[in-house]
Amino acid sequence: MASFSLSFLIFLLHFSSFLNNVMAAKHNHHHDHHHHINHKYSSPSTSNSSDSNPRLHQAFIALQAWKRVIYSDPNNFTSNWLGHSVCNYTGIYCAPSLDNPDIRVVAGIDLNHADIAGFLPDELGLVTDLALIHLNSNRFCGIIPSTLSNLSLLYELDFSNNRFVGPFPTVVLSLPTLNYLDIRFNDFEGPLPPKLFSKKLDAVFVNNNRFTSLNIPQTLTASTSASVLVFANNNYGKGKKFMIPPSIVNFANSLEELVLTNTNLSGCLPQEVGFLYKLKVFDVSFNQIVGPIPYSMAGLFHLEQLNLGHNMMSGAVPAGICELPNLANLTVSYNFFCEEDGVCLNLTSSRSKSKTKGVVFDDRRNCLPERRFQRSEKECSAALERPVDCEVDHGFGAGGGGGVGAAFAPVPTAVPLPSLSPAHS
């Protein structure tokens, strides 16, 4: 992935087309879900000192307060956080302010992979000109300070792979220009707020925390604009049904990646999933989904990765799915599918690309009589005796009948549970 430098982002801040230009670069941004900061960014000739600049003085106060609550810095990232010239501090990036180009401000903080231990002080809210803050892969702990609500220009927030705790940091939902939110691999807990779905965010990563509730609103507005939603590896549900609602269709004009791996997802997949016409990645593996594959998914012509593995789905694997022109990886293993239609029969089940279509295909542990490594006849017969009617049993249609009932426990997995590794910058 081409790096998205801080200097380029700060440059864009001076133009009214800032948001549009960043959105145009989002595909370079999402494949790695991180940025490499350009440490050779050259500063204009205006002063880097806080002596005569009130905004840099505020930043100086904030950074010194932060340094006092940093308890371990094995790579000496903050060793030169001395004196009033904050623009010379390691990991601190300055630029001309939006409202007055003659005034320099702290516009970015990048401490990715610094391995720093400490917490975030309230004074961090004094750095009101921040456009991005990247703290990926450190040992920061504690809760996110509410004073971050003062960061009205913040565009990207990456606190992933740390040790933050507490409920979802709702302060981020008050940030008017926030576009990229990454808090994965922490210890946040409790429910995810429904307001998260009404916030105009391009990318949301909350996977691998301790969240216990994900309430996708039944009345999502058509203004939702996320292209990447990753909610995987959280303990949603808490004994209640957790299903993808038909309102997911309101993401149709933007959503490219939807990852709900290992989230206690149940019920049938709604037909509306097939209306997410920009979708490239759809992963709902390691859940308790029942019923057939919605026939509408045969219209996802941009789909590259489809993972339905380790569920309780049944019926046929439609030919339209196997014929998708951009499909590179199709996993339907550990379900109760009993038939493969058309070209699906020509795909070879393996962990390498099929010679037929160049698709990595895995259909192990189903009820497919012509395939190897399938379930026992006893397991398959029991499943067929308890069909699922998605329209009657689960409130909406999913393109057919036949399924395995909720009384069936998931079959023990034969492969390690995926962890969705944290980003590396």
Image (cartoon, rainbow, N blue to C red):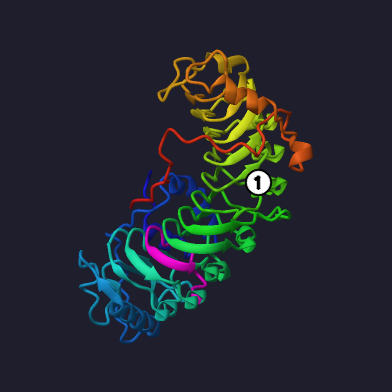
Whether residue 384 is visible here, answered yes or no, is: yes
**Horizontal side of residue 69 vs 245, given as left or right:** left
The N terminus sits in image quarter? top left
Q: Is residue 160 magenta?
A: yes
Q: Residue at x 38, y 64 (%)?
A: 163
**Horizontal side of residue 365 vs 38, given as left or right:** right
Residue farthest along the right direction in this orientation: 392
Question: Around disc 1, counting alpha carbons within 10 Å, would you say few (fewer than 14), some (14 to 19), or many (20 or more)?
Answer: some
Q: Which residues are magenta?
A: 150-166
Q: Residue at x 51, y 21 (%)?
A: 374
The tally of labels here is: 1
Where is 36 relative to 44, above or below? Answer: above
Residue 230 image offset from top left, x and y in percent: 52, 49
Q: Is residue 307 magenta?
A: no
Where is 373 relative to 121, above or below? Answer: above
The residue labelled by disc 1 is 244
